[in-house]
Amino acid sequence: MPPESISASLFDKTARNSLETKVHWLLRIALFCEFLGHGAFGILTKNAWVPYFEVFGIPEVWAYRLMPLVGGMDIFLAVSTLVAPTRAALLYMTGWGVFTSLLRPLAGEGWWEFFERAYNFGLPGLMLWVHSPAGSLRSWFAVISKPPRLSPAASRRYLRALRIIMAGMLIGHGGYGLVMHKSNLVQFYEAAGLGAVGPPLPALSAALGGFEMLLGLLCLVAEWTPFFIFVFAWKIGTEFLHVPAHVYGAGWEWIERAGSYASPLLWIVLNSFQRKCTKK
């Protein structure tokens, strides 16, 4: 028996199942929230989506007609992932996440927008990877009903993937403030009352953007669990600023970004699994 199998077999079965179940359900819930939030904006016919249709020459009037169809498909995928996920759906969600993220730079919004959405396609891709399909066509459409069987070697690979996802989302979001100087960030920080701390809000926005980019780089090398707890809290807090800033559909914005909150939690759970393997 290979050393990795031996170390894994020494695991207490209940503890192993608990960790694997956490990974499985964190991914399912995160993807449910992501696609539910994104789908809600299709139903609400979000104005900001119009330029993405124009990339393909679709006029504004037709963009508004098509948005509910796009949103309805996203909501269907969200519910199916929560209730009865399949590998075929996960493959589609990964491709759809890449496509919708690419629409941002194609519409002239810059590549920072693409990198910030690394979790949109990274997490469905990770769930598909974790539940690697068998060779048969039927396996792609079979309902994934059980948590994955993790091994120390596999968990190391998933941890590296999560590092890249978190680095992308934080560096991309940091680019909004430090490079793009997005005005909506200033609106968020003003709503949070940061205008009273002293520095002008545009300068503060740039500084916080630089801080986020540093956080992203640290995600590639950090090993300390409290650091990833901080990343989780940072994303929860900064994305919640949509609410006090009274952004249209603020609650859905916060829900849609669930993948950015789930990523550090997944890293913590998988790292806990890895450490227990090492101790055995």
Image: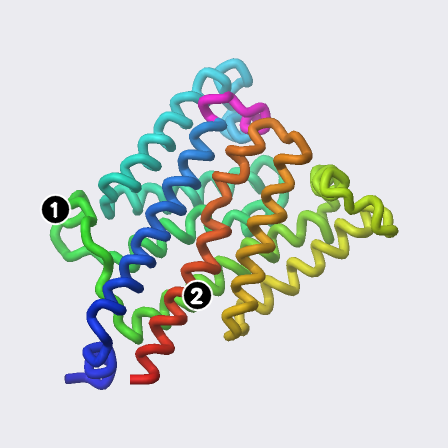
Q: Position of residue 110 (x, y in %)?
A: 63, 44
Q: Point out which mark residue 115 bears.
A: none
> At label 2, which amino acid type do we have?
Ile
Label 1 environment density (alpha carbons within 10 Å; few <14, some 14–19, many ≥20): few
Comes first in the chain, label 1 or label 2: 1
Q: Report the span colored magenta.
A: 42-50
Residue 221 higher or lower than 202, as above or below? below
Residue positioned 35% across, 42% down in the render: 93
Which amino acid type is marked by label 1? Arg
Q: Residues within 10 Å of mark 2 (few under 14, many from 20)?
A: many
Residue at the location (54% across, 61% down)? 167
Question: Which of these two is toward me, 45 or 66?
Answer: 45
**Residue 246 appears at what percent x and percent y?**
66, 30
- Residue 222: x and y in percent read 54, 73
Residue 47 in the magenta stretch? The answer is yes
Dominant secondary-structure state across the stretch colored magenta:
helix
Is 164 in front, or is 110?
164
Circle 2 — which element?
helix
What residue would you read off at disc 2? 268
Residue 246 visible to the viewer: yes
Above or below: residue 279 compared with residue 255: below
- The answer to which image quadrant residue 276 occupies is bottom left
- 70 in relation to 184, above or below: above
* Residue picked out by circle 1: 138
**Would residue 51 be visible to someone looking at this image?**
no
Q: Are marks 1 and 2 in contact (CB under 8 Å)?
A: no
| Foreground: disc 1 or disc 2 | 2
